[in-house]
Amino acid sequence: MTELDCRFCRGQAGTVVLDLGEQPACDYFPRQDEPGPDPVYPLQMWLCAECGLAQLVADPTVPEEPRGTEPAALVAQAADAVQRVAAAGLLPAGARVAEYGSPHGGSWLGLLAGRGLTAVPGAEPADVVLDCFGLMHAADQAGAAAERAARVGPGGVLLVQYHSLATIVRGGQWNALRHGHYAYYSAAALAAMLARHGFTLRRAWQFRLYGGTVLLAASRPGHRSLPDDGSVAALLADDARAGVRDPTVLSGLQRDTESRAKAIHDWLVAERAAGRSVVGYGAASRAVALLRRADAGAALLPVVLDASPAKQGLRMPGTDIPVASPEQLASHPPDSVLLFVSDLLDEVRGSWPGVEAAGGQWVDADALGG
């Protein structure tokens, strides 16, 4: 392969730790009447040996994802996070806030406004700069980190939330890798990125969302001190135990692709052989490579249901599986619903009780082959 430069430190020493082969852009949902084949592109994760940043090797795709419906679990986690950060004294009333959000949706600005904080426009400095799953969408990680740090006013704080690389490794979440997601963070990698701009990690909070997400608070020297509760040191130690800088450990994700994809395929085949009806739920980006690697088409999985009207009437990238409204769960409850987003389980069970009332089951795709 060609020589690589790290998206943050520009180092060239590193290892490809995960290779999913040729995959369609998982934010390109074709119309159901478009026969394909869909364009495919290499999808690989590279671990920089110098700064420890895990990152997407290349991305020739053009983002055009139809907006999804915000899960209740994401809304609840945001409220929980705001409460915890406020309890630490980092969200004083009257403070100015700037938010870098994810293109997939979700914002804390409403919650922060309710606590008396004011959003600032454009590139104005702020007392609180928040990045909620936004940083990973920047191809230039060095530039994006510099931009966020520069916006933090004197005495201000930078808050960064991310899906933990340790979670991805421990949970075998290889399908977290996708085009458009350029970086996968450990606390140590983020500490190095922010230290370049004079910031030190001050506090860490952990959440169950996506199997394990982290919110970090960082500030420059001179910020009114937060009592050391040991959360940052504990997080750094946990990441080290998970082996987030060890290419051999991260390469275990490659083995996980084979076992999990086979488990999904074999389960679908067994359900069909038993004459049981199956549908999927959650036309999420993480389902795209999973279905492709599992060799699952409409013959095994006739439809994936999704609450986003923008995705209904389209089909899953790289397959012939259509996306439809979940309303059919009420009129025609299947024997099994294969759920591609674990965080939705409580929400969808409450929204569609008829599935279990009719004797059906919700099956977490992450648990198959896990």
Image (spheres, rainbow, N blue to C red):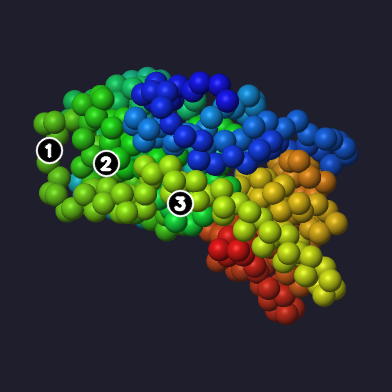
Helix, strand or loop for disc 2: strand
Which residue: 84% across, 35% down?
36
The one of 308 and 289 positioned closer to us in this rendering: 289
Which residue in the structure is indicated by mark 1? 224
Q: Earlier in the sequence, mark 2 or mark 1?
A: 2
Q: CA distance from mark 2 to mark 1?
A: 13 Å
Query: Which of the two marks, 3 or 1, is nearer to us in this view?
Result: 3
Q: CA distance from mark 3 to mark 1?
A: 35 Å
Q: Amino acid at mark 1?
A: Arg
**As drawn, is 358 to the left or to the right of 345?**
right
Q: Amino acid at mark 3?
A: Val
Q: Which mark is residue 217?
A: 2
The one of 281 and 111 positioned closer to us in this rendering: 281
- Horizontal and vertical percent for residue 341? 59, 56
Query: Which of the two marks, 3 or 2, is nearer to us in this view?
Result: 3
Q: Is residue 136 visible?
A: no
Q: Which mark is residue 309?
A: none
Q: Amino acid at mark 2?
A: Ala
- Horizontal and vertical percent for residue 352? 67, 67
Q: Earlier in the sequence, mark 3 or mark 1?
A: 3
User: Cβ–Cβ below 8 Å for labels 3 and 1?
Assistant: no
Helix, strand or loop for disc 3: helix
- Horizontal and vertical percent for residue 22? 69, 36
